[in-house]
Amino acid sequence: MGRLNATLPGALLAVAVALLPLTIHANLGVAAAAAATGTICLLGLLIPSLPLALTGAILAEIVCAIVSAAAPNGESFLASFGIGTVVLAFLVLTHSRTRGWGAPVTPDVLWADLHHMARVLLVATPGAAVVILFAHPLAAPATPLRPVLAVAGGLLAFGAVVQGVIAQARRSR
Amino acid sequence: MKFRLSPLAHALLVAAGWAIVLGIALGRPEPFVAAVPLVTALMIGSVRCDRVEFAVSVETDREVAVEGDDLTLNIAVQASGVTGPVQIVTALPSLLQQKSLPALIMPVAGAALSWRHLVRCDACGVFDVGRVGIRAWDLSGMWVGEQDVTRPARVTVLPRPTPVENPPRPRYVGSRLGAHASTAVGDGLSFAEIGRYAPGDRPRAINWPVSLRRQSLHANRFHPDRQADVVLLIDTLAVVGERPNSSLDHMLRAAAGLAMACLARHDRVGVLEYGGIARSVRLGTGQHQAERVLAALACATPVRTEWVLDLRQLPERILPRRALVVALTPLVDDRVVSGLCSLAERGQDVVVLALDTDALSVPMLHRRERHPLVRRLWRLERDERLRTLRRWGGRAVGWQPDRPLEAALAALNVSRFGRGPGPWGG
C-alpha cells in the first residue's frame, strides 16, 4: 500500500510561494513579506488548515502584484504564471492533507492527483499566453474604480476565510 | 450520493478572484496571468459529478472480543459509477477506538474494494459497529459527496477478568460434589475427626495406630467436599467515573474474575444486575455458564431509576436462600445498602465488596466538589454505610481500584468452615 506524504513537497511549494516575488525584485521589504508569507503557508500546511494556506496564498499574490507594479525592470509574466501554478499546487496538496489527515493513500489516488495537475498545466500554459495578449485592456478600468474594487476584493477574501474557519470548526465538532 | 463544491474549489475561487481584483485594482496584467492556472483548474473541475451510489458491507473478524483486544472491521465498498478518491470513515461508539486512520482509496466502477479498519476495545459492552460514513471526491477534487450507511454488525466485548485465586468462602454449601469442605461428616479429603469404627465405614479409613492404642477399631472421618451457590450482584444504580475507568468497569472486571474463580472450583454461579434493569443469569456451572455470565456482565448498563428490585421477593431459582451473595457496589446509593441489609437479616450469606470511588470521581467533579472537606464527608458517609452492612451481618470490605482484588478478599478473613465472622477488615 503506497503512502502519500505531502509534507515535504508541500513545504517546498510553500518556500517557492514565498521566494517567487523575490525573483521579480529583491529588497529588504520584499524579503520580510516573503518570510511572513512562507511562515503562514507552512503553518497552513502543517496544521493542516486550508483557510490558513489560502491566506498565505493570497498574501503571496498581493506581494507579487505590488512588487510587479513597483518593479523598475518592466513586466514579469513568467514569475506571475509561476506564482499561480505554485499556489494551485500548494492548495491542492494542503487539501490532500486536510482530507487525509495523514491517512494511507493508495497509489491510484496519487496518480489521479498528478494526472489532474498535469492536465491543468497543459491547458493553463496556452491560456496564459492568450491572457498576456489581452491583459492590458483587461486591467484598464477607470482609476477611481480601483479603490472600490480593492475594498470589494478584501471583503471577499475576509468572508471566504471566515467561512472556511467556521466550516472547519463545524467539522471538528 | 449528491456532490457539492469542496473546500478546495472555494479556496481556488477565492485565490483566483483575488488575483483578478488585484490586477484590476493595480492596473497591471501580471495578476491576471497568475490567475490563469487557478481559473483553468476551476474550469476543468466545474463539470458536476454524476450521482453515484455505494453498496457497502461491514463485517467483523469475530463477534465476541475481550476488553483490550484488537478487532478488525472489514468494509467492502462498490461504487455504481466513476468517482475520484473515496474515504471510508467508521462511526464507532466512544468505547471502541479506531487504531488505523481513514484511508483514501480509488474505487473502480462496478468492482468491489475492501478495506480493513483496526479497532481497539477499550471497555466491555455490546456495540453496533455497522455505521459507516463514505466521503467521495471527483477526480479534480472540486466536488465532494457524503453518504451514511448502517449495516447490521454487532460486537460483544466481554470484561477482562481480574485475577482472583481465593474467592470468598461460603458459609453454606450445597448437596453436590464440589471443592468446599462441608460441616457434615462423610466422604471427602478434609480430615474431620476420629471415631469408633461403625458398619459402613471403609476399611481403608481405619486408623491403625489409634485402634492399637485403644484396643478397638477406630476410623478417620472426613468432611465431604460440596459445591456452593454464588450469586454475583452488580450494583448498576449509580456509576462513578468515566468509562473505561468507571466504577462499573472495575466492578465488571472483578465480577468476571470472581465468576471464573468460583466456576473453577465447581461452584454454581449466577449473576444479578441490581439497577433500573433487573437482568439475571440463573445458577449454573461449567464452560457454557462462564460464557453466559461474561455475556451478561458485558450487557450491564447503568439506568437511573426510582424503582428498585426487592431482593427478598426474588425466586429461589435466581437467589437461593443458602447462596453466597457477593455484591459489588460503589456504595453510593442507600437503596443498595437497605436491599443487602434485608438479605443479611433473613440469614443470607452476604459479602459486600465496596469499591472506593474517591480517585475515580475526581475527574468528574467541579472545583468546589474537589475540596478535601467535601470528599472527606463522602468518605465518612461511605464508611457509615459499610458499618451498617456489618451491623446487619454482612461481610463488608472496602476495595481500592488501584490495588489487587485479592488484598480486599484476604481482608474478609473467613474461617475455614464459615462459622465465625471474624474481623471483617475494611
Image (cartoon, rainbow, N blue to C red):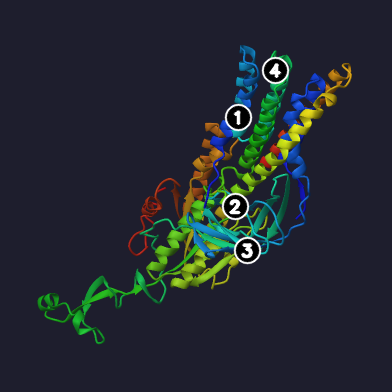
Q: Earlier in the sequence, mark 2 or mark 4?
A: 4
Same chain check for tags 2 and 4: yes
Q: Is residue B411 above or below residue B12?
A: below
Residue B305: percent from the left, percent from the top? 67, 54
Image side of residue B24 versus residue B129, left or right:
right
x 53%, y 68%: residue: B319
The residue under label 4 is A67
Q: Helix, strand or loop at disc 1?
A: helix
Q: Check contact, mark 2 vs mark 1: CB within 8 A.
A: no
The x and y percentages for residue A31 are: 61, 17
Q: Which residue is mark 1?
A: A14
Mark 3 — residue?
B112
**Mark 1 and mark 4 on one chain:** yes
Residue B10 horizontal side relative to residue B117, left or right: right
Q: Give coordinates of residue B110: x percent, y percent.
A: 67, 64
Give the distance between the C-alpha atoms of the residues marked 4 and 3, in whole angstroms: 53 Å
Q: Residues within 10 Å of mark 3 (few under 14, many from 20)?
A: some
Residue type pointed to by label 2: Asp
Q: Callout 1 environment at 10 Å: few (<14), some (14 to 19), or many (20+)?
A: many
- Judging from the image, what secondary structure is the residue with disc 3 in? strand
Q: Which residue is mark 2?
A: A108
Chain letter of the residue beneath label 1 in the structure image: A
Q: Amino acid at mark 4?
A: Val
